[in-house]
Image (cartoon, rainbow, N blue to C red):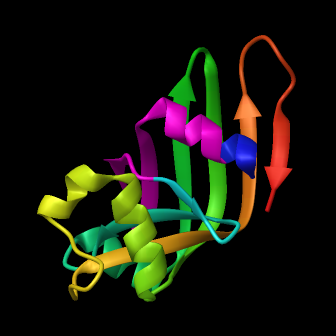
Amino acid sequence: MEKVYEFLKNAEVYYLATVEGNQPRVRPFGTINLFENKLYIQTGKAKPVSKQLSANPKAELCAFKDGVWLRIACQLIEDDRIEPKKAMLDAYPHLRGMYDEKDSNTQVLYIKDATAVFSSFTAAPETVSF
């Protein structure tokens, strides 16, 4: 899991795919945080992505850096506690202009039942499950 965290952190941008009805939805994300031995992402509850994950928590993340790409099939599970929200916002202080751990909009979700696959054109794929 640490290797997945480091890759996403260093890539700076990854793409999150969700489902809305029978339509896939993909958008760029940039938040990843390791808290209590879980990987977390952050969004706002007012955004469509939050509603999509509430209806169906299955998601995929994809990132690319230095000739290697990472795909993660997982579930994203909301954690409504103040502590992981604060940890995320402390890790990304520029988000504090839009979010606060005590507001009703800030949402953090942890990655559950993940299968992460590192791939490239020059090496065999490496799979990490957590």
Q: Is residue 110 left or right of residue 30?
A: right
- In the picture shown, does residue 81 fall above or below 42? below
Q: Is residue 20 visible?
A: no
Q: Is 102 in front, or is 46?
A: 102
Q: Residue at x 72, y 62 (%)?
A: 114
Asked if residue 59 lies in the magenta stretch, the reply is no
Q: Is 110 in front, or is 123?
A: 110
Q: Quadrant of the C terminus?
A: bottom right
The quadrant holding residue 42 is bottom left
Q: Is residue 119 visible?
A: yes
Q: Is 22 in front, or is 85?
A: 85
Q: Residue at x 45, y 42 (%)?
A: 14
Write down the region rendered in magenta. Answer: 5-31
Residue 84 coordinates in the image, percent (x, y): 48, 75
The quadrant holding residue 89 is bottom left
Residue 57 coordinates in the image, percent (x, y): 52, 77
Q: Residue at x 83, y 17 (%)?
A: 123
- In the picture shown, does residue 6 fall above or below 19? above
Asked if residue 9 lies in the magenta stretch, the reply is yes
Q: Residue at x 53, y 65 (%)?
A: 40
- In the picture shown, does residue 49 fall above or below 33? below
Residue 1 coordinates in the image, percent (x, y): 75, 52
